Image (tube, rainbow, N blue to C red):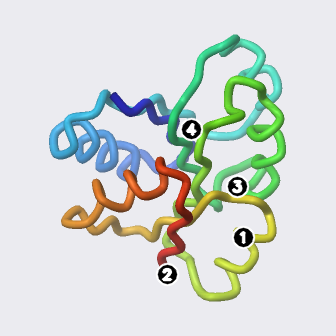
Amino acid sequence: MVSILYIEDDALNQRILTQVVRDYLHYPAPVIWEDTAHLEERLKNLGETHFDLILVDLGIGPLDGVEALPYLRKHPPFATSKIVAFTATLDDWQVWRMRQAGFDGSLAKPLDISTLEEVLQTILKGQAVWQV
């Protein structure tokens, strides 16, 4: 089964993604972090917990998604995790910015449920997906 960490501050988006992941894709419900406060401490407290996929809202705070990415990348259990920007405000410039930052891809909100499983499997296989 695919394990997901979802870093998102909007409660409605949290509920929607949880329902889609659990009820439509039949994956375990994602672990949700509502912000990036105390990120280093949170990562330390996770210990060796690994997530296959980490979805990061770019507009999260206090660190935005780009600022949080290096902390996520340097956490040893996340060495093989796919870290994907997940936001409603994607354009070509943002995609370029996400690539430069080191994300493994981007997903646009709202989700296209009809292609979501295929897109996630593509990302998990190591192929970048850059949705605008």
Classify 10 Å Cα crowding around label 3: few (below 14), some (14-19), many (20 and above): many
Where is residue 71, by image quadrant? top right
**Nearer the viewer's eye, disc 4 or disc 3?**
3
Compute the Cα span from label 4 to label 3: 12 Å
Please state if 122 lies on the left or on the right of 83 as rendered: left
Position of residue 46 measured from the top left corner of the image (x, y, whole percent): 66, 15
User: From what the image shows, is residue 120 above or below residue 71?
Assistant: below
Q: Residues within 10 Å of mark 2 (few under 14, many from 20)?
A: some
The residue that disc 2 covers is 132
Choose top left, top right, bottom left or bottom right for residue 19: top left
Q: Residue 109 is drawn in which quadrant?
A: bottom left
- Whether label 4 touches label 2, CB < 8 Å: no
Residue toward you, 79 or 91: 79
Q: Secondary structure at mark 1?
A: helix
Left of 29 or right of it: where is 113?
left
Earlier in the chain: of badge 1 and badge 3, it is 3
Q: Is residue 103 above or below residue 41?
A: below
* Identity, as a three-letter code, of the amino acid under mark 2: Val
Quadrant for the N terminus in the image: top left
The CA distance from mark 4 to mark 1 is 24 Å
Who comes first in sequence, dot 4 or dot 2?
A: 4
- Identity of the amino acid at label 3? Gly
Earlier in the chain: of badge 3 and badge 2, it is 3
* Nearest-to-viewer mark from 1 and 2: 1
